[in-house]
Image (cartoon, rainbow, N blue to C red):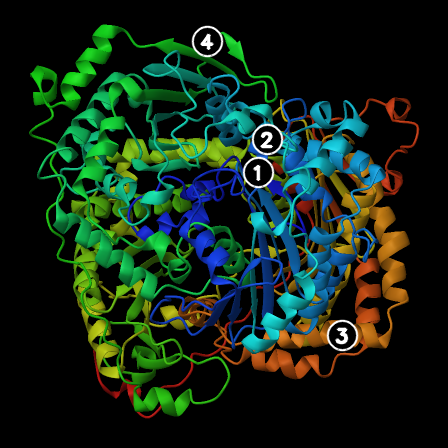
Amino acid sequence: LGPKMGPSQRRLTPHRSLRSLRLLRLLPALLLPVLSGALRIGLADQLAVDTESQRQHAAGGGRVVQVEKAKMDPREYSTFTLSNGLPVMCIRDKTSSQSSASLDIHVGSFYDPNQIPGVAHFLEHMLFLGSEKYPTEGLFDSKLAQHGGYSNAYTASENTNYFFAVSDGAFEECTDMFAQMFTSPLLSIDATNREANAINSEHEKNHNNDEWRIERVKMVLAKEGHPYNRFGTGNKDTLLKDVQQSHKALQQLFNGHYCVKNMHLTLLSSQPLEKTVELAKKSFANVRQQCTDEGDRTVGIGQAMASTTSGVFSPPYDQSVLASTVRVRTLANKKSLSLVWQIPPQNMLWKQKATAYVSSLLSSQHSGSLYNYLTRKDEALVEGVQAGQGESLSMFSTFEVEMPLTEAGTKKIDHIVEAVQAYLALIDTKEGIQNWRFDELKTNARMHFDYKEKEAPEDYTSSVASSMRLFPLEKVLVASSSFEEFNSTTISNLLKYISPKNMIIVNPSKHDGVKLGQTEQFYGVEYDVSPMSKERIAALEQIRSAQGSSAGKFHEDLFLPPKSSFVVTEAKVKEIDPLMAKFNGGSGDPAALVIHDDYASNKDGDRRVVAHWLQDTQFKKPKGTVTVSMYTAKPYETTKQKLTAELFAAMVSDALVVETDAATSAGYSCNIGSNGNGLDITVSGFSQHLPRFLEYSLQKMSSPEKLLKKSRFSAIKTSLAVSIENSLMAEPFRRIGSLLSNALETPHKDPWLTMKELEKVEFDDCVDFKRKNLADVAVEIFVFGNSDLKDARKIVKQATSKISSKVTTPSLLASLPPSDTVSVYKLQKGSKTVFRSPPSDESNPNSCVQTYWQYGRSNNRKDKLYLSVLNAIAHGPCYGTLRTDEQLGYVVASQADARSKVYGFKILVQSSIKPAGYLQQRILNFMDTKLDKIVANLTDSTFKEVVSTLVIRTKEPAQSSSSVQSRAFSEIASREYKYNRREEDVKELSKVTLEGFKAFYAKLRAGPMVSIQIDKKAPANAAELDSDEKPFAEEKDAELNQCEKMEIMPKKFSDWHQNKDTFDHLVPNKLPECKENLCSVSP
């Protein structure tokens, strides 16, 4: 789905939300259907798959149900039904400064009329464009942006989910505006015509995305007439062919299905539950109780959906596709293999979690795992193995195994498929289907649920609303991650469907030089389908049944995981240490305490270790995080050195994957990465086994040369090269930010140069890395979480005993620069510079512009706050003007920019219909005619309202232990140690003035401007422009760097940087002193 890029970037899921989580390994919390977009039962008003939740609502008459929640969940819940029948869950979160609401509608893209694909997605967009009570387009988003919020929505196969977040003070008004979207939307014919272009821009954004293209081929393979076969996004060809007909279809879909019996509502606020309940009653009481035209089941939905048998297995694929290999041509250098099986609906089997059980074994990474066999046996054939439930719909589900391929793997696909079948055969045995394995999953899942971090309010309300109809009300929060009933028959029945005869092999690749015979209509993706021979199917069936010589060849290498010694069985929380309570007893952010400092002690010896400690006194979770940072005397100066460090860290991490599998399955993690001056090693997990896991990880890290394997080096290096190459093929709006950074910063990252330098890195460079770079290091340790002072000192001792900290540079740590390893260029006042280039991917239909204004370096805290005010004020009008009114494209965003305290402001627009010069003109026109006037006419009351919202957001206490840890660690890594940063910001916010803000804005506007332009449709001359277009008005006054090819742009940056000064590196602050003789004890 990508980042939240605007106040309301509407979106269609490729039939599953958060696709990166669709192939799930273990932590069953990741199996949350509310995150994976999976378990979404649509057709709630038609299918016999009526859930317990709905029955309870219908029978309960508004009764309140006690909801089972996590042990550490401080929120309060109330679930009830409004008088009109709308099921509601209200949530109180006392510490949140943001409120949120979400409405889930049991109508998705499967409901599209046959003749107009994309109507459900279209309706999702249209509902945001005004209601009878609030007819002004963009008013809702502007109000949200003014109060620190935003809205969004997604359309999936069988449901559509709408949500917003806003500061508490504006929640009541915004909730009413939100409710009116579903009570009396305008759905005007004028907006229909305009918004269809936005849908088309969204489709164009996804057009060259290989993930969307591959998913689309899977849908095209479905038999004709099955709703899975249809094109759910819509585009101008489907929606603008007959605007009147499209408008009628929108009205039919809304009138026929947008009523309370197809809805679930969730609201979250810090106010008392009683007030939120009253708000729900007041705002949503007039939502229609009955849908119209209920006698006609085809109203608003396609014929295929209407004729689908209710509540029974309706598989999408027939025998012409099953037991076949499907080759799909990709645009990026993507080589992968997916095995797909259609299985019966899993919605009602949430207690048994059969798919999660099987996927946990297939995705395991122990020494006898499928992963270990395919990555380390002879040569690496795959880069990973991920298994899990793909689609999970009311008519069918899919089970998938996905494996990114190495070059060697592309030549051994048959062998890989055989290995998967062999491992499935192991699972489908008495040893494979065991209660104790289920119990491990159950325990790990429950621990993760009880002590999980809080989600953002809008993410939480969206997920709760979408799952309310799936589970019994008391289980709504826990059911998706709860393993309640071990049922060997359910698992065995599932495995019967995961068979060679029911399998589709999907092989996405560039397939250079290979002609593929079929082309999909809407994405233009090429593919072909080749049935497997009867002999091949029979051979795979023999392996799957563990019979024959082919099955025997895997027996020595593949075996199931043993019992784990890392399953967490206790969750003891330490008492708050008196010293931590003494120094962190206030209401502000807690400060880490220095508990060891070799520099301050002036002891003889050559160790240089500093250790910080912060006990989690707020959330009190039985978890901890330890970060060990090793800093070298010299930062990595060359691209090759940086790449060597990255490869070294990747190889060590890769080697630890198999050895730490049992721990990672229980929620422990060990991450190793380059920090620009050395390496960071971060180990985290539950306190019970954390010391043992830390000991093991650091022990292995102390002798990395024993972990490095030449065979893995080649695979990891190739994977890095491919990822760099593919980054150049990303959508323009994803590429353009790095190009702006390259223009503004030094050293800048040239991906083309990086690829060349990567070729020079050899295995021996990684072997020598420790000797050359880690022989003279300082060590800095940060211990966070469920550790008192005694525990923290033990951890420091444990870490320093494993990691050498011998230095030949005595003042190494004290002399290191802060973490801003780049310098920012000072741009000449009033200068205007344009960098324009065609996209790297010539087939991409989009142009994109990001224009940046530089304010300059400032140590005045008020300037940072004025930038935040500008960001809040500009957000709504920018989106409303360039996206909604002018329909330039789907992706429009304005954003504050702060890099090393050099402040700036930027606007981004991507378009498939206009060239870059025109986009730049409209951006400048927005600044000149809209934003300048908004600032000039800004009243003191409006300014204070915006500042008040910023104060509330700034004062909001941390919402999770991970946010406390990350805030503290950022202060340590940056060497600023300003743990009271937010308190100081709040003080300064009380001093900001409207006059000061206007002066800040005037300086910004008078400052230098840089425009980065990826231009797909730049005309040869002005005559080729549309009649209403004009050439870029500022171009004649700008320094234009025209690049014939994208790879020339870095050279243009280098030339432009000549004779330009940079802002100085930030000066690190002095290390805080040890308090209360905390450093008197040597680790």
Secondary structure at badge 1 equals loop
Q: Residue 784: x percent and y percent?
A: 34, 72
Relative to the observer, which residue lies in front, 406 or 255? 255
Q: Residue at x 50, y 74 (%)?
A: 976
Q: Nearer the viewer, mark 3 or mark 2?
A: 2
At 16% from the left and 46% from the top, the residue drawn is: 706
Which disc number belongs to residue 119?
A: none
Q: Amino acid at mark 4?
A: Gly
Closer to viewer: mark 4 or mark 3: 3
Residue for badge 2:
232
Badge 3: how crowded within 10 Å, few (<14), some, or many (20+)? some
Q: Nearer the viewer, residue 711 or 159?
A: 159
Q: CA distance from mark 4 to mark 2?
A: 32 Å
- What's the CA distance linking mark 3 and mark 2? 41 Å
Q: Which mark is residue 945?
A: 3
Label 4, label 3: how many angstroms apart (C-alpha)?
Answer: 62 Å
Q: Which part of the image, by quadrant, shows the N terminus?
A: top right
Q: Number of callouts in the render?
A: 4
Alpha carbon of mark 1 to alpha carbon of mark 3: how far? 38 Å
Does residue 50 appear left or right of residue 778 in this picture? right
Mark 4, residue position: 513
Gap between marks 1 and 4, in whole Å? 39 Å
* Amino acid type for the residue under numbered disc 2: Gly
